[in-house]
Image (cartoon, rainbow, N blue to C red):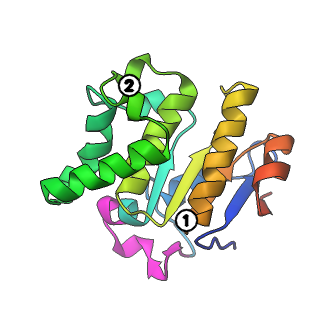
Amino acid sequence: SCAFAPGERVAVTGPNGCGKTTLVRLLTGILRPTAGKVLLDGTDAASLELWGIGRVIGCVFQDPARQLFCATVREEIEYGLRNLALSEEEIAARTARYLAFFRLEHLEGAFPGTLSQGEKQRVLLAAVLAMGTRYVLLDEPTASLDMRAREELGGLLTEVAAAGSGVIFVSHERAFIEKYADREQVLG
């Protein structure tokens, strides 16, 4: 049993095979529990459609390139907002806010496939948080990042949590965990 709160940064750790990936899949609705419950802000996730789960928790997987499919960074952030049937003014405002927050303004017209790993992660974080999700989940976020990109990501995750969103990240990197997690949830 574990719990995650808005505004906190939690590192999920444990040995290989202990269930970290299973937890990610349960939290995002990719898997449904065969026993027990997954509660998202008090609502049983089993009663929610995938899109409903995605409104509460968004995920950036270890290889963000597999999640990107739009022609530009701007379109990537706008995509989910358009599916919420928001006004053009609201879409433009949220997109501008998250382009600025994640320091992506200079890349808004770029094709996401040409971006660095860290830039791809920032695009997905912007797209997820623009949707108004209360939690963001990252699976091995530092796996392909150099030290500068790790520091930048850690700083952004700190800002995300300070703005009130819960940040959950699966990691094996002790230095990143010790610097950027408020607490550690050990599995296994």
- Taking the view exactly as shown, the residue that stands out farthest to the top is 114
Give residue 112's mark.
Answer: 2
Please report the residue visible at 61 percent of the width from the left and 65 percent of the height from the top.
Answer: 162
Residue 14 in sight here: no
Image coordinates of residue 143 in percent, x first then y, are: 68, 31
Residue behind mark 1:
163
Image coordinates of residue 74 in percent, x first then y, are: 29, 36
Q: Is residue 130 left or right of residue 157?
A: left
Measure the C-alpha gap from mark 2 to mark 1.
26 Å
Q: Nearer the viewer, mark 2 or mark 1?
A: 1
Q: Which residues are magenta?
A: 37-52
N-terminal-most mark, 2 or 1: 2
Q: Tag 2: residue type?
A: Pro
| Figure check: 8 above or below 71 | below
Q: Nearer the viewer, residue 34 or 9?
A: 9
Please report the residue visible at 85 percent of the width from the left and 42 percent of the height from the top.
Answer: 175
Image coordinates of residue 60 in percent, x first then y, are: 51, 44
Residue 33 in sight here: yes
Decide: few, some or many residues near mark 2? Use Cα within 10 Å; few <14, some 14-19, many ≥20: many
Give residue 106's mark.
Answer: none
SS for callout 2: helix
- Is residue 130 shown in magenta? no
Q: Is residue 112 left or right of residue 162?
A: left
SS for callout 1: loop
Q: Is residue 113 left or right of residue 14?
A: left
